[in-house]
Amino acid sequence: MIIGTAGHIDHGKTSLVRALTGVDTDRLKEEKLRGISIELGYAYTPLVDGEVLGFVDVPGHERLVHTMVAGAGGIDYALLVVAADDGVMPQTREHLAILELLGIAHGAVALTKVDRVDDARIRAVRAQIDALLAPTALSRAALFPLAATALEDPGVAALRAHLHAIAANWPKHPEDGLFRLAIDRVFTLPGRGTVAAGTARAGRVQVGDTIAVMPAGIEVRVRSIHAQNRDAGVGRAGERCALNLVGIDKTALARGGWLADPRALVPSTRLDVHLRRLAGGRVLANRTPLHIHIGTAHRVAHLVCLEGNQLKAGASARVQLVFDAPICASPGDAFIARDAEARHTLGGGVVIDPGAPARRRRSPERLARLDSIERLLAGEGIEPLLRNAPQGIEMRELVLADRRRGGRTFRLSRGALAGIVRTRHGCSADLPWGTTRRTGNRPWPPASHDPSDPGRRGLARRDRRPGAAAGRPAQRTLAASTGTSHHLE
Ligand SMILES: Nc1nc2c(ncn2[C@@H]2O[C@H](COP(=O)(O)OP(=O)(O)O)[C@@H](O)[C@H]2O)c(=O)[nH]1
Ligand SMILES: [Mg+2]
């Protein structure tokens, strides 16, 4: 499990992580000199069951909210830190709003610096926190008054026991689906070369795997893996992983990129999303530029309304985000929107269709299709999408549907399957649950089809070449309706 701090600058986040784990996450010279967190910090602590609990410590500075968002995107559980002397402050509110928009629904509150105030002040700040959390998913979060800088503080001990108990019972992330990891850190290890680290958002990766750096589409081999700070043969969804990569220089990688199964992501400059505005702030008109944070990426995009011509504070609607350069996202990914000056968080939401079209984007057919993807994301299954997919649906949508059903194999009729599957290759591809479908109009089986290699079957050689699997815009290939389905029904 991964816990992420949140809260205003100087409220004691880094001190608390140090008290809980013994690790000082302010490791940069500048951080030590200035006494503030600038970069994301990482700490790990062993649990009694042999697992490892990870912490991501975020900066609280108002100018570093973009860094906070990159860190918060990969966490399971929030640790909201409020200092008893200051009480609730602007980044307490903003970080909390970001956690909500990212869908992080579990967490605890640390009321720090109680050694500096009297009991009346503690009661007053508790009341402030209760009022702040009441309308949120964290309304019933446990609160721990503590002094992080005191030796053997009982409040810190109680919080540690709480977090370890939560971690011991935290459900495992499903490992099915195609691997993808949002890069938040890149470095070079002497004698070993390039390492990229981040939280694996889906699937699993193994030593020896070939994966793609996205959106660039460069294929690299995984030489070794550290998962939750330990040497490991496999990295799994939900774990912080550091992958030592062969065949790439550090300069070709950066925070914001992805390491992914070459089939997992298709770069795109247009995302259709559901955007929820926070209360307050001006109306957003068509073409408004916004700062968008998605995965660990931070880009500018223009807003195009798909319903109506503006989006008021407190409102919620489907919009298209148009980027200057391709980015990668999957349906269901959360994002944060900040204003053009990157001063205020305006809202956030969920990606519906990451391969959105430029034309007829407001047509009834498109909106019906977005409806059906949203219903799929809400766990209603793939049938609504099939009804709204005259062009077929994408492999990744099938993958998503399977994931939403808890990894169980789908049951679809032969009729429903006819014509549904298209891939960006326009050829056969293997589904993550081990089923091969013919799509497109190439001969079946493909020339490179190797029946002795069921794990890779169905991917034609020409689609394995670097840049072919990745980096190419989605082709709206109509699936062959002649392919017989094998195991899908
Ligand atoms: N007295 C007291 N000081 C604290 C406590 N927690 C943090 N501090 C001090 O508050 C300052 C800011 O702490 P830091 O952990 O860097 O805050 P951050 O910006 O939220 O990470 C430092 O000087 C800490 O020593 C606490 O519980 N009690
Ligand atoms: Mg700090």
Image: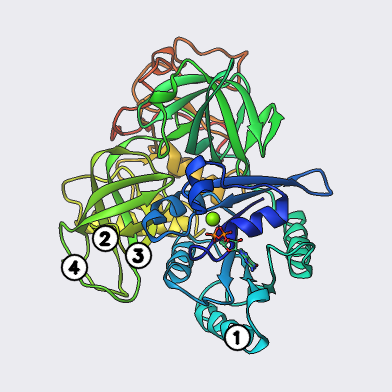
Secondary structure beneath disc 4? strand
Q: Secondary structure at mark 2?
A: loop
Q: Which residue is mark 4?
A: 310
> Which amino acid type is marked by label 4?
Gln
Name the mark nearer the viewer: 3 or 1: 1
Foreground residue, 93 or 170? Answer: 93
Q: Which mark is residue 347?
A: 3
Residue 120 sits in quarter = bottom right
Lower position in the chain sequence, tag 4 or tag 1: 1
In the image, is residue 225 above or below residue 402?
Answer: above
Seen in the image, is 283 located left or right of residue 262? left
Visible in this render: residue 433?
A: no
Residue beneath the point at 58% across and 32% down:
242
**Badge nearest the viewer, 4 or 2:** 2
Dot 3: element: strand
Q: Give the secondary structure at mark 1.
A: helix
Residue underneath mark 1: 121
- What colour scheme does the image use? rainbow
Give coordinates of residue 168: x percent, y percent: 77, 55
Number of the front mark, 2 or 3: 2
The residue where tag 2 is placed is 339
Q: Within 8 Å: ligand 1 and the Cβ of disc 1? A: no
Gap between marks 3 and 1 measured at Cα:
32 Å
Q: Earlier in the sequence, mark 3 or mark 1?
A: 1
- Asked whether the residues under the numbered discs 3 and 4 touch, taking CB atoms below 8 Å apart as contact, a structural biologist would say no
Q: Could you tell me residue 396's position as x and y percent?
A: 44, 39
